[in-house]
Each structure stands twice: as C-alpha cells, then as structure tokens.
Image (spheres, helix red, strand yellow):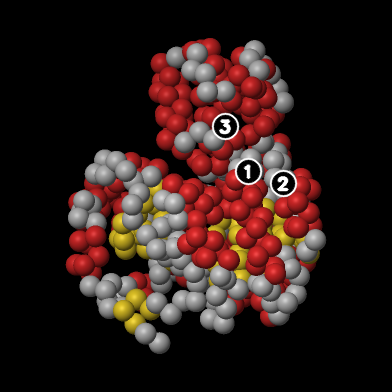
C-alpha cells in the first residue's frame, strides 16, 4: 500500500487566495460564537478547486446540520474573498483520522476520478454502509437487491432503484460502492456530474479521455438519473457508454425519483434499457421504519453530545407517527429539537414540539409540491405557468415568480439547486436573491404579507381567506 505525504502548508499554498483562519473569524462574527463553537469550528479546510472548496467534518450528522442551516451564509462569506466559488463540498473524516488528515493521505482507493475536476475526491461515504441502513418492509426489496449486487456482481444488470427524495437511494449506492471498492474499479457519480464532465470534455476537445474514463470501469453507480432529462447530446453519449459497459460485463446501478417509464424527456431506448434489468422501488417509510430511524438518530446524537439530549418516548412516538413524508424530513425534525434544546437548555414538551415542527407536520399532511405551489401562485396572480417559468423580466411576472420561489423554499425541503431546476433551471444564486427580496418586502409591504399568508393557507390548508 502506497502512501503520499501531504504537508499542511503545501495544501494552503494551493489556496493562497483563501485564508482559512480569517474565514473562521468571519464566520464566528457573523453567525455568532455559540453557533461557531457548536458546529462551524468542527469544519477543517482540505483543498480548493477551480470553483468549489472541499472541507471536512467529523460526522455525517454535523455535515447535515451545517448544510441545512448555515451553508448559504458560509458560501457567501467565502465568495466575499473569492467570487468564483459556487459551492462547498464536505468529506466525512472521523476525529481520530481528521487529527492527522494533513500528515498522511491513503490513496489506495480503487475508484476512478477525473483529474482537476469535481471527481477528485472519494464520493463513497464510509458512513453509509449496509450495516447502518435501517430496514423495514418499505425498503427491504431494494436493500436485498443491492446486497445481492455487492455479493455477486453478475446479478441484476442494470439494477434500477427508484423512490422519493430522502428515502435512502444514495445510501444504498454508497453501500454497494463501499463493499466493492477494494476489488473492482468503481465509478460513483451523479447524473449532474456526468453532465458537467461531458460538457467540459466537449469544450476542451477531450472526448477521447471522457470515453476512456467512463467506459473503463467495472461498476458504474449513477445517482439521480432523472436530471439527465432533455440533454439529447449527453443522453446519446450515456446510451453508448451504457451499452459499452454492458458488453464488457461491467455492472450498472442507477437511482431515480421515479420508475423508468415515468422519466420525462429521456430517450425511449434508454428507458427500455433501464426496464430490462431489475427495477425496485423504495416506498414511503412505514411507522416501523420511522421509529427505528428516530431511535438510531437519537443514539447517534447522544454519542456526539453525551447526557445533553433526552427526548421523551412520547415525543419520539409523536414524531414517528406524524412525519411520514420522507426520512430526510424525519431527521430534519430531530435536528430542530436538538437545536431547541441547545438554545433553551431544555428539551421541548409535546406542545412546544408541535410549534417547532409546525411546517413539517403540515407538509406531511398536505403533501406540498413545487407544482402545487406554482399552480396556486399563478392562479392567485392571474398569470400562466408558462409565463412564470419564462425568462421574461416584466414586473408583473417577476414578483409572482419570486413569491413562488420563496414559498417553495419555506414550505418544502428542496435544496436551492433542486428549486432552481423546477423554475426553468435557474441558478441557485437567483433563488437566493428571490427569497431575500420577498423577505425584505415583507418588512414594510403589508400587501405582500397579506398575499403570502393567503397563499400559505391555500397551499397548506386548502383555505383561501384565513390568515
């Protein structure tokens, strides 16, 4: 096993435009000492690439908490020092490993990455393994199929796993990659990153290298294939890559948010290839699974903060019963309760829990979708959905569009890039601007406040006049 010694100072020279000590100081000043000491201090700088920064954190829980609460503010602080940065990536490095992360880096990873690209780090998360994937009747078939693939790569080719957001699809992909990475050459990539590499290869006139990277692999794990919709040239290349891998006996595992025949703007021949393998779905988490997840997450938190978190069985049962939309929302609910307990130095009672989780409880009951929000906002402002999603910047269209984006941000668990895609592939900075614009208007514009409240009632409760 060959090791490469990387000096901490050498890494910093790669990022001479960024002073991590200064950035940490700014985070502490702008976000507060308590937030910084509790969460942000645990981040360590690893490396800066062309337009994103790679940071490390000791646990997946800390990564999820920082991502859901502070990522936008952290990115803005970084952008104030280097405007080309567009994203932050995290790598999970356990504390015992992180302590010496700069001194020794084990490069024995049998995983393909394209040099100087988004793939220049290990995307297989060691915290997402079969051992900690929680099983029930709602996801057992997908789990068993994934396990079979990792035990015998000849099984099921391709394996196609689909289910809603936050159901555990990426966890299963990680688990397969983790089991096979020592014996096979693995390519683990999202559809978005595949697209990025494809476009980059075309611009640099380097398609030969692109084909070599993606076709010279034993196991292709590709996440969120639905985001390949509408990109005809990329779909063409993916189709030929797919066939080349099957012909050489490579294994392909694909995840998506819907069944193959429900994919929109994807070539029929690609959907046919997906359907020709084993197609399994992950259903909404049942009560048994939700209870297991809550218990497991609380155990995780207690290991991180011993003797500080004491969630009663009544509240655990309430959360498990009431938040049924996705696993991600369930974990988000627990994160809120932990935050409440750290701020107020006590665990919330049942009444306080209902207040803290009010919007999540509404979401699980009313099934709020971006399409529903867009439809109701268009009806409210008397415009068509095509007008809202167009590139036109007329005032009578901009304000409804910003309102719909704002409501999507506060009423769904969608990320900024996901919201941008549903609004005609707008950039995440446009989404941030829209949200901040509406928040600013609400401070002085009573009509805007009234409109937002009426729309929230229509979306959440199907009531038009109540505020």
Q: What quarter of the picture does the N terminus occupy?
A: bottom left
Mark 1 vs 2: CB contact within 8 A: yes
Q: Which residue lies at the image location 76% right of the left edge and 58% below the top edge?
A: 273
Q: Is residue 415 left or right of residue 14?
A: right
Give me the disc on residue 267: 2
Label whose residue precedes the other's in the sequence (1 or 2)? 1
**Residue 466 visible in image:** no
Q: Secondary structure at mark 1?
A: helix
Q: Which residue is mark 1?
A: 232
Asked if 431 appears above or below 304 in the picture, the reply is above
Q: Which residue lies at the image location 42% right of the left edge and 24% below the top edge?
A: 437
On the image, which quarter does residue 221 sit in? bottom right
Asked if 378 appears above or below 144 in the picture, the reply is above
Mark pair 1, 2: CA separation: 8 Å
Q: Position of residue 440 (x, y in %)?
A: 40, 23
Q: Which residue lies at the image location 63% right of the left edge and 49% below the top edge?
A: 235
């Amino acid at each position: 096993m060959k090791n490469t010694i990387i000096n901490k100072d050498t890494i910093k020279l790669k990022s001479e435009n960024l002073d991590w000590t200064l950035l940490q100081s700014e985070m502490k000043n702008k976000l507060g000492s308590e937030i910084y000491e509790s969460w942000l201090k645990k981040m360590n700088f690893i490396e800066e690439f062309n337009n994103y920064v790679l940071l490390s954190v000791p646990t997946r829980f800390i990564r999820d908490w920082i991502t859901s609460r502070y990522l936008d503010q952290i990115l803005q602080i970084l952008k104030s020092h280097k405007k080309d940065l567009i994203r932050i990536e995290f790598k999970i490095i356990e504390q015992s490993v992180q302590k010496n992360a700069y001194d020794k880096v084990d490069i024995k990873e049998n995983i393909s990455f394209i040099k100087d690209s988004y793939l220049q780090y290990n995307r297989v998360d060691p915290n997402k393994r079969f051992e900690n994937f929680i099983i029930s009747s709602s996801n057992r078939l997908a789990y068993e199929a994934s396990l079979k693939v990792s035990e015998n790569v000849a099984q099921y080719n391709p394996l196609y796993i689909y289910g809603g957001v936050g159901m555990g699809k990426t966890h299963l992909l990680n688990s397969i990659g983790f089991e096979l990475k020592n014996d096979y050459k693995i390519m683990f990539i999202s559809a978005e990153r595949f697209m990025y590499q494809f476009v980059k290869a075309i611009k640099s006139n380097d398609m030969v290298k692109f084909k070599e990277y993606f076709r010279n692999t034993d196991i292709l794990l590709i996440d969120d294939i639905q985001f390949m919709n509408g990109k005809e040239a990329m779909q063409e290349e993916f189709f030929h890559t797919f066939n080349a891998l099957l012909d050489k006996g490579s294994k392909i595992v694909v995840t998506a948010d819907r069944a193959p025949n429900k994919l929109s703007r994807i070539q029929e021949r690609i959907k046919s290839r997906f359907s020709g393998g084993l197609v399994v779905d992950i259903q909404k988490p049942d009560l048994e699974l939700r209870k297991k997840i809550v218990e497991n997450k609380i155990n995780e938190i207690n290991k991180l903060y011993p003797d500080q978190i004491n969630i009663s069985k009544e509240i655990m049962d309430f959360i498990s019963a009431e938040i049924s939309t996705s696993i991600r929302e369930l974990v988000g609910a627990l994160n809120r309760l932990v935050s409440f307990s750290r701020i107020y130095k006590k665990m919330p009672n049942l009444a306080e829990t209902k207040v803290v989780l009010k919007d999540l409880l509404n979401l699980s009951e009313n099934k709020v979708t971006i399409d529903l929000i867009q439809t109701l906002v268009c009806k409210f402002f008397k415009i068509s959905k095509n007008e809202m999603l167009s590139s036109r910047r007329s005032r009578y269209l901009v304000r409804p569009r910003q309102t719909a984006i704002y409501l999507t941000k506060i009423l769904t668990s969608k990320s900024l890039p996901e919201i941008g895609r549903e609004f005609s592939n707008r950039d995440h900075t446009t989404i941030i601007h829209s949200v901040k614009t509406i928040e600013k208007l609400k401070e002085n514009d009573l009509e805007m406040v009234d409109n937002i409240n009426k729309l929230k009632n229509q979306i959440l409760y199907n009531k038009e006049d109540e505020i």
